[in-house]
Amino acid sequence: MFGGGGGMNPRKMKQMMNQMGIDLTELDAEEVIIRTPDEELVFHDADVQRMDAQGQQTYQIVGEPDTRPRGEGTDADADADADAEGADDAADDAATAGAEIPDDDVEIVAARTGVSEDDARAALEETDGDLAAAVERLE
C-alpha cells in the first residue's frame, strides 16, 4: 500500500498510518497455509502483518513458500480442518483421513448396522472414515 515508504523514516510512517486510522500488527506466525483447488502454499517462519483499516483486516505474508499438491497435509492440517468444521464427525474424518480405518470404528459400524466387519470396513473406506455416513450407507 505504501510501497516501502519511499525512504520515509519508520516512526513517521507509523504516525501517518495512525492518523489515517490504520493499525499495523506483527503476528508471531509459525506457519501459514494457503489452499487452492490444486495445491497448497506453505510458508514456514514467514513474517506476517495484520493491517486493520476502515473495519477490514488485511494480512501480508512475506516469505518463500513450499508448494505441495492438495491432500499431502500434516496432522496439524487435519486438526485445523476439524476445528473449522466444528463437528464431532468432522474430527473423526480428519483423524482417519488418509489413514487405516481403526478397528473400533469398524466394530461400531458393524454392531450398529448388523453387517460383517468386512462390509463395515468397506463402507468406512468409501466414506473416508465418516461413521455416520457409513452407517447411513449400510442401513
Image: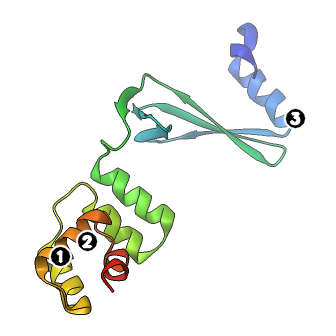
Helix, strand or loop at mark 2 = helix
Image height check: is 41 above or below 77? above
Residue type for callout 1: Asp
Check disc 3 and report the residue beneath it.
Answer: 19
Point out which mark residue 72 bears.
none
Check disc 1 and report the residue beneath it.
Answer: 119
Residue type for callout 2: Ala
Image height check: is 47 above or below 125? above
Q: For the residues labelled 3 and 2, say whether their Cβ atoms are less than 8 Å apart.
A: no
Image height check: is 6 above or below 21? above
Q: CA distance from mark 3 to mark 2?
A: 60 Å
Q: Position of residue 63 (x, y in %)?
A: 46, 24
Within 10 Å of the Cα at label 2, are there few (<14), some (14-19), or many (20+) other Cα atoms?
many
User: In this rendering, would 55 be left or right of 108?
Assistant: right
Image height check: is 84 above or below 119? above
Where is residue 127, by image quadrant? bottom left
Within 10 Å of the Cα at label 3, are there few (<14), some (14-19), or many (20+) other Cα atoms?
few
Point out which mark residue 123 bears.
2
